[in-house]
Image: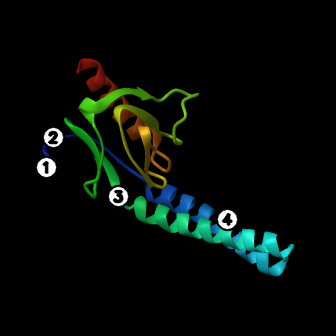
Amino acid sequence: MSDENVIATLQATAARRLFAYGAVFALGALLIILAFFQPPAFGWQIFLIAFGAGALVVAERLRRATLFGLVLTETELRDTAGTVLAKLDDVKGVDRGALAFKPSNGFVLRVRSSQERAWAPGLWWRYGKRVGIGGVTPSGPAKFMAEQIAMRVREG
């Protein structure tokens, strides 16, 4: 992984990370507290506990995932841990419009070949022939990265 050909980087800011983590963690904690201090019927209590525990797990995954950033090079889009999200020659297009099914402050890459499902909460997701970038990332750097990818897709 050489940094000499890096075109763009995308990193979640500390304030966005803290807010997103806090919101999801608070949801999980409140659901669990509600299940014990205002217990509904037993089935609903189990549902609240399970849903709250799931939210706590997602909060921790979000905290860990947003420690990393994304790097765009001439050949690929990868995270700073080295996971390749998409090769640029496999990208068909970039969806970033208001009505596109995309993460907040982000964009979606349409790729030619279906890839393994993966999710880094708050940073990116990959499902089938789509890769979603964004979530807790700032919109300016995400827009720049999307424009750079779109420009390379048009040229190639």
Q: Mark 4 and mark 3: span between their CA atoms?
A: 24 Å
Horizontally, is 74 left or right of 130 in the view? left
Q: Which one is in front, 147 or 62?
A: 62
Residue 27: which numbered mark, if any?
A: 4
The answer to which quarter of the image holds residue 154 is: top left
Q: Circle 1 sits on which residue? A: 2
Of callouts 2 and 4, the N-terminal one: 2
Q: Which residue is mark 2?
A: 5
* Label 1–label 3 contact, CB within 8 A: no
Q: Secondary structure at mark 1?
A: loop
- Give the residue at mark 3: 68
Q: Residues within 10 Å of mark 4 (few under 14, many from 20)?
A: some
Identified by mark 1, the residue type is Ser
Asked if residue 3 can be seen in this view, the reply is: yes
- Identified by mark 4, the residue type is Leu
Disc 3 or 2, which lies upstream in sequence?
2
